[in-house]
Image: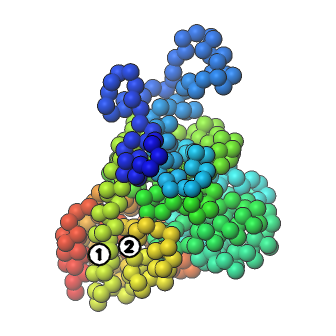
Amino acid sequence: MRDGQQMATQAIHAGEIHDSSGSHIAPIYQTSTFTFADMASVEAWAEGETDAYIYSRGGNPARTALAAKLSALESFGMAEDSESVTAEIFASGMAAISAAIMGIAKAGNHVITQQVLYGSADHLISDVLPEFGITNTRIPGLDPTALATELANHPETAVVYLETPANPTLGIIDTARTAEIAHANGAKVIVDNTFATPILQRPLELGADLIVHSTTKYINGHGTVVGGAVVSRHPEVMEEQVASLVRFVGGVPSPFDCWLTNLGLKTLPLRMRQHCASAMKVATFLDTHPAVTATHYPGLPSHPHHELAASQMDDFGAMIAFDLGSYATATQLMDRIELCTLAVSLGNIDTLVEHPASMTHRVVTPEDRARSGITDGLVRISIGLESVDDIIADLEQALAT
C-alpha cells in the first residue's frame, strides 16, 4: 500500500488479489489442493525459493489476502515495525485465542489474566489449559500493582492475556501500562481486540505483542461467518509458535469464509462510525431510564474508565451492558423486544440483545460470574445499523412498566 493512505482506503485495497483473469473482485479459491507443473517446481517450493500454495490447510490465496488486510489495519499509524506485522486466519475466534496462548505458554508456564472474560475464553484458561500444565491467576482489572506482584510471585509467567473493552462488563484495561509491566518480567501480552476492532484501537501501538480477533463479529459484520485471527509484531513468534498451529492442529477457515470476511472488512471503517454514533445515543437513553439500575458504556463520563478509554481508543464502540436489577426484569425486556433480536454474538448490522449469565457466560460458575460483575439482571446489547430512533423506541416499549 502507498504510504499515507487512510484506513478506509486500506480496508478496501490492502491485500487484494488481482489475477490474470481480470476479475475486479478476487475469485474464491475453493480448492483443497494446488498443482505443480513439474518436480522442479516442487523442489523450488521445498527449498523456500517460491511461495507456492500446496494444500489449503497450509495456505490459500483468500486466507493470505485477508491476513494482509488485517495486518495493514492493525499496524496503521505505527511509527516503526509496521512491516514486521503479520497475521494468520483461523476457523473461529476460539481457535485463534487457543493458538495465541498455547503457541507461547507451554507446560509449566503461567498465564495471568483479568477477572472478567468472554465465557469460552474463561473456560479455556480456567479449565482446559490446566490439563496441559498451564496454570493461571485472575486479577480484577489487571491492577498494575497486583500484576507486578503476581509476576514476581510467578516468574514462570509466559502470557498476560486481556480483553479491552471486556466482555460483557465493558471494563477497560490500560494496555500500555500492562505491557510495560509484563515485558519487564519477560511475559508476552495478548489482547483480544474483538469489541474495538483496529478501527477504534490498535494494541500493537500500545505495546501488545499479539492481538486476537473473533472475525465472526465486526470484521465480517454480517453474521455469515465464524472465524478468527491472530496478529503480531513478532514474525518469528508467528511463524514458529502460533501460525504453525493452524496447520498442525487444523483450525483452518474455508476459502469461502475468508472471502466473505474480506468482503465484510472492506466496509468496517464506515460501519464502525455509525455503530459508535448510535451506541452513544442508546447508552445515554439507558443511563437516564428509571428501570435501568446501571449502564456500562465507556463513552459515558460516568464510566469509571472513561478517561482511559478516551486515551487509548479512537471511539467507544457499539457494545453496551445495562443492569435491570433481576433475572425477571431482564427476561421481561428480552421477551418484549420486537426490532432488536434475542441472540448471542455481536457486531452484526442488526441489533442483538443477550443475557450473559444464561447465554454467553453460562459456562462460568455463578461464583465467578458474581466476582466478575455479571449479575442475573445484566443485559448485553450490540448496537446495529438500524435507525437509532427505532432502536431506542423498541427498548423504550420493552422497558415500559
- Residue at 32% across, 74% down: 280
- The answer to which quarter of the image holds residue 200 is bottom left
Is 16 above or below relative to 34? Answer: below
Residue picked out by circle 1: 282
Task: Tell me where residue 228 appears, x and y as whole percent.
Answer: 49, 49
Is the C-beta separation of discs 1 and 2 under 8 Å? Answer: yes
Task: Name the foreground residue: 235 vs 217.
Answer: 235
Secondary structure, mark 1, is helix
- Residue at 70% across, 70% down: 181
Residue 311 falls left or right of residue 293: right
Q: Earlier in the sequence, mark 1 or mark 2?
A: 1
Instruction: Name the amino acid type tagged 1.
Output: Val
| Label 1 packing within 10 angstroms: few (<14), some (14-19), many (20+) | many
- Residue at 55% across, 45% down: 87
Quarter of the image with the C terminus in it: bottom left
- The answer to which quarter of the image holds residue 260 is top left
Residue 80 falls left or right of residue 309: right
Residue picked out by circle 2: 320
Secondary structure, mark 2, is strand
Q: CA distance from mark 1 to mark 2?
A: 9 Å
